[in-house]
Image (cartoon, rainbow, N blue to C red):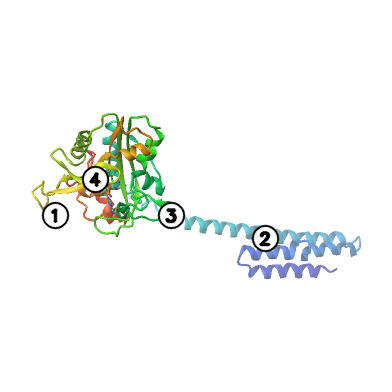
Amino acid sequence: METSSIDEIRHAFDEALKSVEHKKDLQDLKVEYLGKKGKVTGLMKEMKNLSEEDKPVYGQKVNEVRTHIQGIIDDTLEKFENEALEAQLKAETIDVSLPGRRFQLGSPHPLSRTIEDIEDFFIGLGYRVAEGYEVETDYYNFEALNLPKSHPARDMQDTFYFSDEILLRTHTSPVQVRTMRSEKGGGPVKIICPGKVYRRDSDDATHSHQFTQIEGLVVDENIRMSDLKGTLQLFAKEIFGPDREIRLRPSYFPFTEPSVEVDISCFNCRGAGCSVCKDSGWIEILGAGMVHPNVLEMAGFDPDKFSGFAFGMGPDRVAMLKYGIEDIRNFYTNDIRFINQFKPTEDGGVHNESI
Ligand code: FA5
């Protein structure tokens, strides 16, 4: 083999190098010349056909070409890598003079605040917080509360059914029954139960198909209606202010006897009558009564020995009254502008507290 073909290969490589633009092109070129089946490797294989005399000169020339090509490939590769690194550093440059992103201070949802305030008040009176199930059985939601299958009062609390027996609870009252049952007929029981409830009510300013309730239940010997009234009076003053009054109106719930609706003096007109309270001076906040003997009995308590009172309030309505919120749907539409109005103040209050 002639050394001129070695020069040709060197020349061809130098020419091909001119069109190398990317690292990949360079790698292909390396394979083409220095790879196992590459052109320079091919030159080396020719050695065996040469005379002993020609071998050293030829070998030296091939080595020079190989060193030349290898050197250029290494340098070009380093150049590509440096360029890539520089481009990356440029792209990732941090402008330390840019203003930072502000962290917004969050605030508890007004409904959560109200529930916590109510819980704190009752815990202070020695109540325990009990939990129930949002998916309930027909038995606990209705039957064990003195509402048998065909009872007309079921219409007041139509709900969403999974099957004939499984439903979304319409109130937190099933927790009364579950708690009394777990006590196995021995008192005293003193619980509140906050939680979500569901009804097939049409949504409007004061009704939602999903809302919250807080149930309260006290069962012991000699529990009287006056205990219920005293507890609710204290509650109203604690949550709404010391000058607030309550009144009890006769009502009907199948699971309490007697039953009452509890009104609070209007926060807006202080009892004089205005559009908020529909000129009555009072606003309804909860239902309550003395636990019906049938309910005590079904839950395993002896109604001749034990008596109790229960109440069920809607914290949504309590929060609306407390903060002057006109539409219950504001609680559930997650408008951050609405929630931001309830940032806590340094003294632990809330910015737009209306009372
Ligand atoms: C009950 O749910 C009874 N379980 C309460 C009770 C418990 C009475 C224990 C006696 C003893 P009522 O349906 O009135 O009662 O609901 C209680 C409160 O839930 C209402 O005063 C109101 O504040 C709230 N509420 C009722 N329906 C809705 C609704 N669709 N949207 C928002 N709040 C509601």
Mark drawn on residue 286: 4
Q: Residues within 10 Å of mark 2 (few under 14, many from 20)?
A: some
- For the residues labelled 2 and 4, the Cα–Cα distance comes to 85 Å
Residue type of the residue flagged with mark 4: Leu
Sequence-first tag of 1 and 4: 1
Disc 4 CB within 8 Å of nearest ligand 1 atom? yes
Residue that mark 1 sits on? 278
| Residue 182 in sight in this render | yes
Mark 4 falls on what kind of element? strand
| Disc 3, SS | loop
Tag on residue 73?
2
- Circle 3: residue type: Asp
Marks 2 and 4 close (CB-CB < 8 Å): no
Identify which residue, 93 or 247, lies in the foreground.
Answer: 247
For the residues marked 1 and 3, what is the alpha-carbon distance in whole angstroms?
39 Å
Q: Residue furthest left?
A: 272
Residue type, mark 2 in image = Ile
Q: CA distance from mark 1 to mark 2?
A: 90 Å
